[in-house]
Image (cartoon, rainbow, N blue to C red):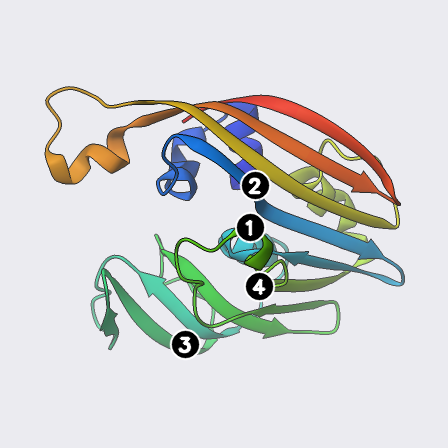
Amino acid sequence: MSSFLKKVIEKNNAESAKRYFLRFGKGVYNQRFLISYTKGKNIKVRGSFEWANDFVRFVKENKDLRFFGRVMSLEKIQGMNGKKKGASFVYDVEESSLEEFQNPYFYLVNVNSNDIVLKIKKALPKPGKEADKIDDKFCALDIDVKYWPKFKEYFFWDVPEGKKVQIEHTLEVTEVEIPKDVPTEEVREKSVRKGKIVRKITVDGKETVKEYDLVI
């Protein structure tokens, strides 16, 4: 598994990460995809809402645990009672492995064990938040240091080791290619966004900037 952003940057199965970019038209978007960690006896990771699904998948891949909270799905799950909210269905879960949700829109769940604690807020932020109002602690994950090598490879693969790391991204979308002969309702999903991702990494107070081409 790789995080959605790593897939985009490395152009590896990036299509599966496209959903995180659909709301961006031409323009410059600051302080996006916020993620940070502090390292002590354990690793404390914090992130904006976009990381929710990847954090949950990391937990599921590394330990068999039961989750509680809410799951949002764009599809109605047979045999389950969900509340319709906008374009999605919201399902309350308790002591769930989440196996019944094969293609969730968002996992808004918690889990608590001796070496993994995950807390995700239960309502997505409203669209159009200004950069300085983006919640960089929407997702909170505390993990034992034994999970760190794999977690680093997923989320901090290009980052030097440090005790305190903060990462923010600027998206510069310079072109949006709209495909021909696509129904109006599919234009947003089928369009290709081009530009660059500026990745600002601060490790123990030392800042570096990396730029990557964006085509998604």
According to the image, label 2 marks what residue? 30
Q: CA distance from mark 1 to mark 4?
A: 14 Å
Marks 1 and 2: in contact by CB < 8 Å?
Answer: yes
Residue under pointer 1: 131
Residue type at tag 2: Asn
For marks 4 and 2, the one nearer the N-term is 2
Lower sequence index among marks 1 and 4? 1
Give the percent coordinates (x, y) of residue 51. Answer: 55, 52
The number of numbered badges drawn on the structure is: 4
* Alpha carbon separation for disc pair 2 and 1: 6 Å
Image quarter where the C terminus lies is top left
Q: Quadrant of residue 173?
A: top left
Mark 1 neighbour class, 10 Å CA radius: few under 14, some 14 to 19, many 20 or more: few
Q: Secondary structure at mark 3?
A: strand
- Closer-to-camera residue (128/55): 128
Q: Label 4 is placed on what type of residue?
A: Phe
Q: Is residue 99 left or right of residue 212?
A: left
User: Is residue 161 visible to the viewer in this orientation of the structure?
Assistant: no
Mark 4 lies on residue: 138
Residue behind mark 3: 93
Looking at the image, is mark 1 or mark 4 nearer the viewer? 1
